Image: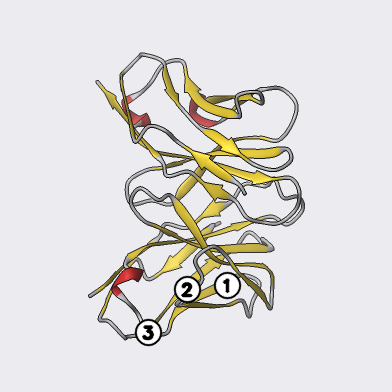
Amino acid sequence: NAGVTQTPKFRVLKTGQSMTLLCAQDMNHEYMYWYRQDPGMGLRLIHYSVGEGTTAKGEVPDGYNVSRLKKQNFLLGLESAAPSQTSVYFCASSYRTTPNNEQFFGPGTRLTVL
Amino acid sequence: AQSVAQPEDQVNVAEGNPLTVKCTYSVSGNPYLFWYVQYPNRGLQFLLKYITGDNLVKGSYGFEAEFNKSQTSFHLKKPSALVSDSALYFCAVRANTGGFKTIFGAGTRLFVKA
């Protein structure tokens, strides 16, 4: 059981470049989330999904897009990277049954935009 | 609006001494409260949660947390700290009024000195 995995682990982009972060989970979770973590700000929700084929905006969605074509995968895209998107990105997933379920996190992707 | 405050950026404690990491929250309706721990270069790991019932919740690695409704607090505690407890701790809250949004605090770094 790998849990939640993220690729890549590290990435350096130039301003204006694009990239996709991949999240995969093998726990058959319905819900998946993308967060960014910045010093002193905790985790902020970018986008989330409550099931295959559905996505919704979180707190800080601007500059990001997501897709959930398969239940086990949740992709985060940056179409035109900006230095303000330098951050550590975490994917998480959780069970559907009740809203009090804890989230399971991936190891993170450290992104630097120059 | 939901919010979480962790008033201390860092907590220092000697090994063997009790530790407390503070958390206060604001939410409409009854809260679901969580504590997560993050070790260096890792994703967040779930420690414990309060849903309803007993105000003292026990979790992983000997941690416990006390829910205080009148003070809107959910402080994390451990009777005897270990050096290996040194990590970043996040408090999180979700309202039980529906929705999927979990609000995370900014985090408190715990440093346990041998």
Residue nearest the viewer, comparing A38 with A77 = A38
Q: Secondary structure at mark 2?
A: strand
Q: Residue furthest front?
A: B1
Q: Quadrant of the N terminus of chain A?
A: bottom right
Query: Relative to residue A33, is residue B106 drawn left or right?
Result: left
Query: In the rendered image, which residue does mark 2 sit on?
Result: A22
Residue at mark 1: A73
User: What's the residue type where badge 3 is placed?
Assistant: Ser
* Mark 3 Cα-neighbour bin, 10 Å: few <14, some 14–19, many ≥20: some
Q: Which residue is mark 3?
A: A80
**Circle nearer the viewer, 2 or 3:** 3
* Residue A102, x across and y down, in percent: 62, 46
Location of residue A72 with respect to B57 vertically, above or below: below
- Return the x and y of residue A98 as percentages of the image width and height: 75, 50
Which quadrant would the C terminus of chain A be assigned to in this image?
Answer: bottom left
Q: Which chain is mark 2 on?
A: A
Tell which subunit mark 1 falls on.
A
